[in-house]
């Protein structure tokens, strides 16, 4: 895999709004031999319906975002696709679209699922496609095995070679799931998307595995949206992040996002982007504004040592 050099994207007003420079990381090479560069902050859409996804993605584009994350299973790709059609004013090649297909699919099912992705999004290709889970969500025995993961991965390789995804990856995969893929892969996964935030630690013991195999480790739920926690442990306005935020004149959520982004900006890092979600225009803009300040080494160590809010383990139980 090529160097993970950071590239400043001078995006101008391509999204229809503010001029923003967003660093990116190179995660792979597409079928045409071009670098695939993933911006370090994207707009998340999990749990949004089509209407809310449309509204939030349009607001994100207006704020200067150039990266949107969705999935087959989110059931909001029509809304995301309409937002791209209506609100993205730049070139297609300057927009990064990430989506997913369900886990536990046979070859034909996987190929059909991505065809539906493209139809709902109104696109000819996406910039990154991943299998969403190392099995189906119910972990049905006949859809949860090394053989099933391998069959689905090889289907993703077909999608890549057809030019319908510029890069391919995985989500919720633990070390033994990654080994299953690597045993048959002719194209290495470029991204593994796993829960990671202040307080989570390396919940599934996967970070070193990703580093070993040059797989970009990407956070989902960077603000711990689904977490159950006390208000004082909140990654938006809890005691720890708010105390650090006050020193920098920013918000607690900006500190939480910067904690991950700053790791990605470190030379030799294998950490990738964050995809916070919001339908509030002020929060959307704030979530993107994480490149104007830097956390001290001591602050980074304090945030890394936090054990709350805890992440939810269990992905590694999938056989």
Image (tube, rainbow, N blue to C red):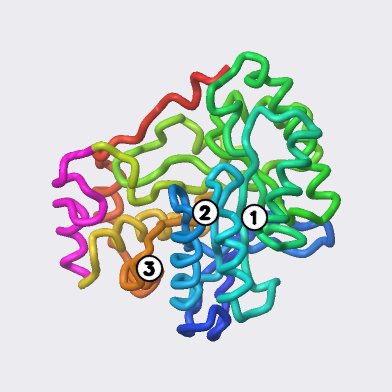
State yes or no: residue 59 in magenta: no
Q: Quadrant of residue 183?
A: top right
Q: Secondary structure at mark 2?
A: loop
State yes or no: residue 246 in magenta: yes
Magenta span: helix, strand or loop, mainly? helix
Q: Say which of marks 3 and 1 sits in front.
A: 3
- Residue placed at 57% from the left, 33% from the top? 133
- Magenta segment: 229-248
> CA–CA distance between discs 3 and 1?
25 Å
Q: Which residue is mark 2?
A: 272
On the picture, is 33 further left or further right than 73? right
Residue 284, disc: 3
Task: Look at the numbered discs 2 and 1 and tell me whether their residues touch, using CB distance below 8 Å.
Answer: yes
Image vertical order of residue 65 relative to residue 155, above or below: below
> CA–CA distance between discs 3 and 2?
19 Å
Image vertical order of residue 109 relative to residue 245, above or below: above
Q: Which residue is mark 1?
A: 27
């Amino acid at each position: 895999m090529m160097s993970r050099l950071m590239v400043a994207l001078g995006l101008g007003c391509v999204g229809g709004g503010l001029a923003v420079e967003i660093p990116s990381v190179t995660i792979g090479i597409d079928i045409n031999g071009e670098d695939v560069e993933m911006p370090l902050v994207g707009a998340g859409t999990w749990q949004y319906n089509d209407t809310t996804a449309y509204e939030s993605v349009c607001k994100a584009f207006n704020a200067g975002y150039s990266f949107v994350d969705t999935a087959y299973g989110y059931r909001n790709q029509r809304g995301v696709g309409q937002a791209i059609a209506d609100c993205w004013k730049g070139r297609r090649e300057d927009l990064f679209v990430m989506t997913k297909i369900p886990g536990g699919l046979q070859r034909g099912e996987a190929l059909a699922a991505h065809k539906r992705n493209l139809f709902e999004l109104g696109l000819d290709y996406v910039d990154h496609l991943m299998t969403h889970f190392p099995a189906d969500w119910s972990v049905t025995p006949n859809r949860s095995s090394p053989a099933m993961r391998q069959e689905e991965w090889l289907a993703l390789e077909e999608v890549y070679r057809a030019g319908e995804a510029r890069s391919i990856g995985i989500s919720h995969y633990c070390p033994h799931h990654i080994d299953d893929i690597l045993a048959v892969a002719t194209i290495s996964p470029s991204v593994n998307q796993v829960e990671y935030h202040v307080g989570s630690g390396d919940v599934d013991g996967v970070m070193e595995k990703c580093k070993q195999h040059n797989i970009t480790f990407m956070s989902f739920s960077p603000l711990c949206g689904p977490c159950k926690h006390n208000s004082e442990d909140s990654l938006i306005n809890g005691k720890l992040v708010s105390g650090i935020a006050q020193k920098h004149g920013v918000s607690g959520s900006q500190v939480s996002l910067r904690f991950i982004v700053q790791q990605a900006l470190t030379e030799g890092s294998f950490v990738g982007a964050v995809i916070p979600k919001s339908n509030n225009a002020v929060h959307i803009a704030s979530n993107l504004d994480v490149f104007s300040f830097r956390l001290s080494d001591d602050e980074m160590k304090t945030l890394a040592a936090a054990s709350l809010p805890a992440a939810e383990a269990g992905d590694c139980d999938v056989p």
